[in-house]
Amino acid sequence: MNFSFEVLQTDPTGARRGRLTTPHGVIDTPVFMPVGTAATVKALTQDALEELGAGIILANTYHLYLRPGHELIRKLGGLHQFMSWGNAILTDSGGYQVFSLSALRKITDEGVRFRSHLDGSEHLLTPEKAAEIQLALGSDIAMVLDECIETPAPRNIAEAALQRTTHWAGRARRYFLDCAGRAGHPPQWQFGIVQGATFADLRRESARQLLQLDFPGYAVGGLAVGEPHEVTCEMTAEVTALLPNDRPRYLMGVGRPEQLADYAARGIDMMDCVLPTRAARHACLYTSEGRVLIKNARYIEDQRPIDPNCRCCVCRRYTRAYLRHLFAAGEITAAILATHHNVSFYLDIMRQIREAITFGHLANFALELRSRYVAGPA
């Protein structure tokens, strides 16, 4: 099955309902991708992810390169076979991870030289190397290496990072196109990443430069890193206004449940975030009524499900009192059940977003979502 993307319907907000076809399945968009950093979504089995309807998940180049190694994964049949996952996979380039190692890395035009957080060994991650690793992994969608910077950032820093990101994207694209047609390489799409911090003109310039490289899809990076939600939406809209209508758009690292519809309204087709899984492990459950901090004493005798409006297997079977007990006792099952619910909740919001786009009332849905998603019974 070949790659393709088509927009099926549009909403007055600019949101798109689409269909992304990959060799490992067809994905309805807008879509939320659960994060499986080291070839596993923490606390969930692949069976559970399939039951929840996750058509695509995210894995990370940096972590898989360091452990167990991309050549081993290639030898064992690629990432899909290695982790026994038949649906689609997107791999991040690892750029965010190495840039977050501020004391352990040095950035030059060549690439990023860094020391492993595992054993201190030294490595050089170049645009070509990031592409090589992802080809070995055999993910369906691979991201180019970009330069991530802290926000807020001075304009000169943001401008320099933009230029380096474009330069690296060109190198990654040339390497990818040279290798992709060779025997033994699985089919793969490579996405460019728009940078530019919170400067609207730099965002537009980054998008224009990347369009010259003719990627089959484009991501918006470097947002949702501390700036106000309104600024994230503003910068996203600046970029999507320039991107081709017939190519998927991916906003990286977002977001909170009540924000997802806002990103779809800016023309975003793909999103990912560690929030539902990370929050679950810290006893924070997302519900249609807001957050439930399940360790609170108020839930000791609470016989209600986590979310009375949720139809996931956890909400159908277990009570808040039981979940609280599991967390208080330090049981592994607590994280498993909480993660299952949170991922289900996120995927169900995306289903509702797609339905709202179909009927042309995403703006009303987004308003309702924000109004009922209060701080909750925490």
Image: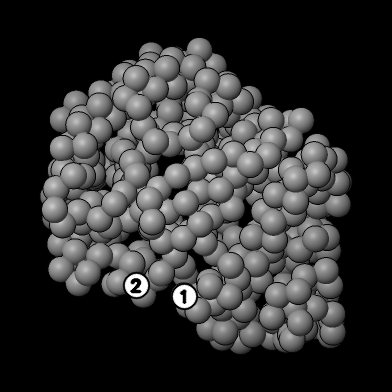
Task: Measuring from the top left, give residue 308's x and y in whole percent.
Answer: 84, 72
User: In the rendered structure, which amino acid carries the disc numbered 2?
Assistant: Met
Task: Measuring from the top left, give residue 333's x and y in whole percent.
Answer: 57, 84
Residue situated in front as seen by the camera: 285 or 77: 77
Is disc 2 in contact with disc 1, using a CB cutoff of under 8 Å?
A: yes
Q: Quadrant of residue 323?
A: bottom right
| Left or right position of 108 against 87 | left
Q: Please indicate, yes or no, whether residue 140 appears anywhere in the rendered image.
A: yes
Q: CA distance from mark 2 to mark 1?
A: 8 Å
The mark that comes first in sequence, 2 or 1, is 1
Which residue is at 15% across, 62% downward?
71
Q: Quadrant of residue 9?
A: top right
Which residue is at 48% across, 35% downward?
247
- Checking the image for residue 83, the label placed there is 2
User: In the rendered structure, which amino acid carries the disc numbered 1?
Assistant: Gln
Is label 1 in a helix, a strand or a loop?
helix
Which residue is at 25% across, 23% downward?
167
Q: Residues within 10 Å of mark 2 (few under 14, many from 20)?
A: some
Is label 2 in a helix, a strand or a loop?
loop
State the scheme by which the image is colored: one colour
What residue is pinned by disc 1? 46
Q: Quadrant of the C terminus?
A: bottom right
Residue situated in front as seen by the camera: 211 or 238: 211
